Amino acid sequence: MILAGQRVAAQERPVDCSGICALAWSPADEHLLGAVDEFGLWLYDVNQADSAPQLYPRENSMSLSFDPQGRYAAVTSCPDYILFEPCHGAIALFDLQEQVWIELGAYDYLIQNVKFSPDGRYVAFQKYEHRAYGLQVIDLTTNETFSIVDQSGENRTALVRDYAFDPQSSTVAISNGSMSYEFGDYFGISVWRLSDQTLQAFTSGGVIKAETVAAYLTFTETDTEIIFVDYDTELFVWNTHTGTISSFGPILENTYDNLHRLSFSTPPTYLIASIVDRYAIGHRTLFVWDIQSREQVFVRDTPEDSFMNLVTMTDNGEYIAYSSSVDERKIVHVWERSSYVTRQIELIQ
């Protein structure tokens, strides 16, 4: 892996959170929890309950992902944030063995939602430039950076809502589109080959029905099936080879347009989500849902005075962590499924 770079200098406050900006578990060490906030990257080992989380400064950190081998954490940030001014984003890797930051790039636009490919070769992030979203990919074996761009004029790579790599790390699927139907922006899913950035498959606009928008997605354990959820919280499977789309049905009743944050485990056994109460905006329901059995394995109702909107789960389903992006106390709750015990970790400098 080529990672020519330098240590990252300290930066300023993030633009979209006053609490914790992102949470993630390491897929290689499912006892290692990561969090990012305005001060940098925090790491906490749940096996060492008496120890304090460790801070590795990188101010203005906004999104986080661990590579599959557990060597690096990718972090995006907003280095020179000034109120009412455009954010100039940056991305760096933190080497967990050497405990140093390696700068990958700085940009004249906001970047967010960083993810590694399953083989660890690629790291990708969403970009927001000149009022248009897109997907940027860095090949860590060659240091090549490229964008996934739709040359057909169908805008399939504008307004990116979510993306996912296939299990073989050969393609990337993108869900995109505008929620404003009057403008007729494309909304659906497209699949792109990474080696030459060519379009391989796509859904037609509207996917299942005219009001359906694919919000969040992931591949199954094959490279031909994509699970996605729409803003009605209805779950679908799209077979990219046959073109067929089937429905699992609604996840929760009466939650139309109330999804706040959502992710899938790897493989997609579980669906992890934050749901807004549309009648009481200060309330959230955090839940983990077993896709096959339809069992809710974890539910937390968080009223306004304990507002929680971040939730993440280890791939083996043993630990669930949740927190708030607006609570300046910066407390992470870790729930152990086998014991039903919840511990609290406070991020303090």
Image (cartoon, grey):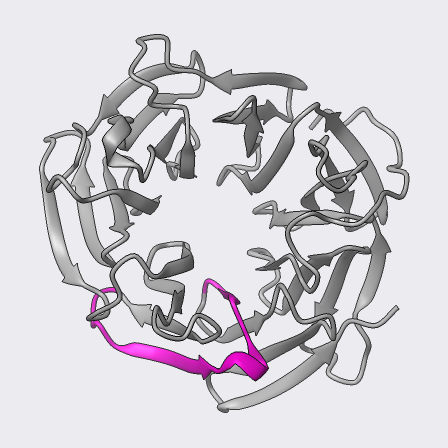
186 and 208: which one is in front? 186
Q: Quadrant of the N terminus?
A: top right
Q: Which residues are magenta?
A: 291-315
Above or below, comparing residue 189 to residue 222 in the picture: above
What residue appears at the point 31 percent right and 27 percent down from the top-left corner? 191
What residue appears at the point 40 percent right and 26 percent down from the top-left corner? 170
What residue appears at the point 50 percent right and 37 percent down from the top-left corner? 117
Above or below, comparing residue 108 to residue 99 in the picture: above
Place residue 50 in its image quadrant: bottom right
| In magenta stretch: residue 314 | yes
User: Residue 199 at x, y = what percent?
Assistant: 31, 17
Place residue 176 in its image quadrant: top left
User: Residue 226 at x, y = what percent?
Assistant: 26, 42
| In magenta stretch: residue 96 | no
Q: Quadrant of the C terminus?
A: bottom right
Place residue 213 in its image quadrant: top left
> Does residue 71 appear in the picture of this structure?
no
Answer with left or right where residue 184 lies relative to residue 215: left
User: Residue 81 at x, y = what percent?
Assistant: 77, 39
